[in-house]
Image: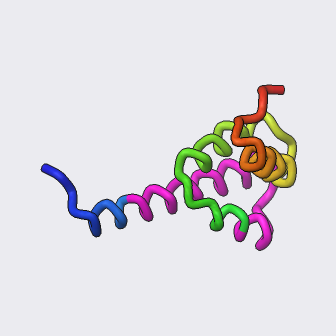
Amino acid sequence: MEESVPDQAIMRKARLAEARHILLRLGRKQFRPADEATVATLNAHLDVEKLEELSERVLEVGSWEELLNLAARHRRTGRRPANS
């Protein structure tokens, strides 16, 4: 059974919200609670896969700033940064 376009949009929004929530929880445990600017930057991400990639990278970086810089570099180059 195929889902309707509105159902797909609702599911996409739910996946985005869940991916952000998980990333914020992991980051809070690894670094500290995210400040407003960090939350705003994460809320600007509209790609679930990119948010999931950032979640995986949380353990490879030392701060929210470093994580978001990796994401910015990835957007500019179109490639995932190499592992450290």
Res. 21 in view: no
Q: Quadrant of residue 46?
A: bottom right
Residue lying at 77% horizontally and 73% vertically, measured from the top left: 36
Q: Give coordinates of residue 75: x percent, y percent.
A: 72, 49
Q: Give coordinates of residue 18: x percent, y percent.
A: 50, 57
Q: Is residue 74 above or below residue 13?
A: above
From this viewpoint, which residue is outermost toward the left? 1
Q: Give coordinates of residue 13: x percent, y percent.
A: 44, 64
Pick the residue in front: 48 or 39.
Answer: 48
Residue lying at 67% horizontally and 61% vertically, measured from the top left: 42
Res. 32 in view: yes
Residue lying at 78% horizontally and 26% vertically, measured from the top left: 83
Secondary structure, magenta segment, majority class: helix
Q: Is residue 38 above or below residue 78?
A: below
Q: Is residue 78 left or right of residue 17?
A: right
Residue lying at 71% horizontally and 70% vertically, measured from the top left: 40
Q: Quadrant of residue 39?
A: bottom right
Quadrant containing the C terminus is top right
Q: Is residue 64 left or right of residue 9?
A: right
- As for residue 55 lying within the magenta part, the answer is no
Q: How is the image coloured?
A: rainbow
- As for residue 20 lying within the magenta part, the answer is yes
Q: Which residues are magenta?
A: 12-40
Q: Give coordinates of residue 51: x percent, y percent.
A: 61, 50
What number of labels is visible?
A: 0
From this viewpoint, which residue is outermost toward the front? 77
